[in-house]
Image (cartoon, rainbow, N blue to C red):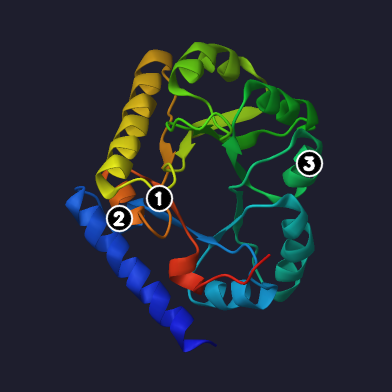
Amino acid sequence: MRPDLAQNLERVRATIADAAARSGRGAEQIALVAVSKTQPPEMVVEAAALGVDAFGENRVQEAQAKIPGVRQLLARDPTWHLIGTLQRNKVPAALELFAILESVDSLRLAEAISRRAGGRTVAVLLEVYLGDDPRRPGFRPAELVQQAPELLEIPHLDVRGLMTIAPLNASAEETRGVFRQVRELRDALRDDFGQSWGELSMGMSEDYPIAIEEGATIIRVGRAIFGERALP
């Protein structure tokens, strides 16, 4: 087992505990999703042996090649999160691989997931984007408020909350502001529609302590655990 993997995980867990304490919560209230994109199945198995029980993948195609191999090597299957953009034509494959789809970024995608659900209930998060790049995926806040009633009526979807990625090259204070706005949006939606909206997935290797301080319940950490990624 790579000693640096164990050391990295210990460091990340300590940082989670410190940030959670600053937000008045315990570390057990923060779910760590280890972002395993570009990592081989053996590395996922090593992380699982160190107590990691949730992994995140960005691309369905890579997950199709990786997850079956991991399942063969582990006695129990970890929880798999899709955290990257999901194309509608990849929905059937994604539903076979992932327990939760974190990157539902449009009403059309939500409807496509429902059509392909085969009667099962699919856990999803709604991706929100607060930056000013029109090319970036995600609901804009006003759009989400407008479409929330329709989204909540779609059958076979369990909308568990929101997910966001901070804008690229944002300062620490700008990032904090984004996370705070997304938390406030989640709280407003919960107040308006009476749903649990309990999950708030935000924060990556560069900014997960800030995300926890601002209310994240799920963080997605790759490089701080596995080190620099190999090129895809």
Question: Going 75% across and 71% down the picture, which residue do you hit?
Answer: 72
Q: Secondary structure at mark 2?
A: helix
* Proximity of marks 2 and 1: CB atoms separated by less than 8 Å: yes
Three-letter code, disc 3: Lys
Q: How dense is the environment of label 1, judged by Cα within 10 Å: few (below 14), some, or many (20 and up)?
A: many
Q: Earlier in the sequence, mark 1 or mark 3?
A: 3
Three-letter code, disc 2: Pro
Question: How far, Cα to Cα, is label 3 from label 2?
Answer: 32 Å
Three-letter code, disc 1: Gly
Question: How far, Cα to Cα, is label 2 from label 1?
Answer: 7 Å
Q: Secondary structure at mark 1?
A: loop
Tell me residue 54's x, y (percent). Answer: 54, 59
* Proximity of marks 1 and 3: CB atoms separated by less than 8 Å: no
Q: Earlier in the sequence, mark 3 or mark 2?
A: 3
Q: How dense is the environment of label 2, judged by Cα within 10 Å: few (below 14), some, or many (20 and up)?
A: many
Residue hosting label 1: 203
Question: How far, Cα to Cα, is label 1 from label 3?
Answer: 25 Å
Tell me residue 193's x, y (percent). Answer: 43, 15
Residue hosting label 2: 209
149 vs 91: above or below: above
Horizontal placement of 77 versus 52: left or right? right
- Snapshot quadrant of residue 91: top right
Q: Earlier in the sequence, mark 2 or mark 1?
A: 1
Q: Is residue 74 visible?
A: no
Residue hosting label 3: 90
Tell me residue 213's x, y (percent). Answer: 25, 48
Tell me residue 99's x, y (percent). Answer: 64, 47
Horizontal placement of 7 versus 19: left or right? right
Question: Going 52% across and 72% down the picture, which residue do you hit?
Answer: 228
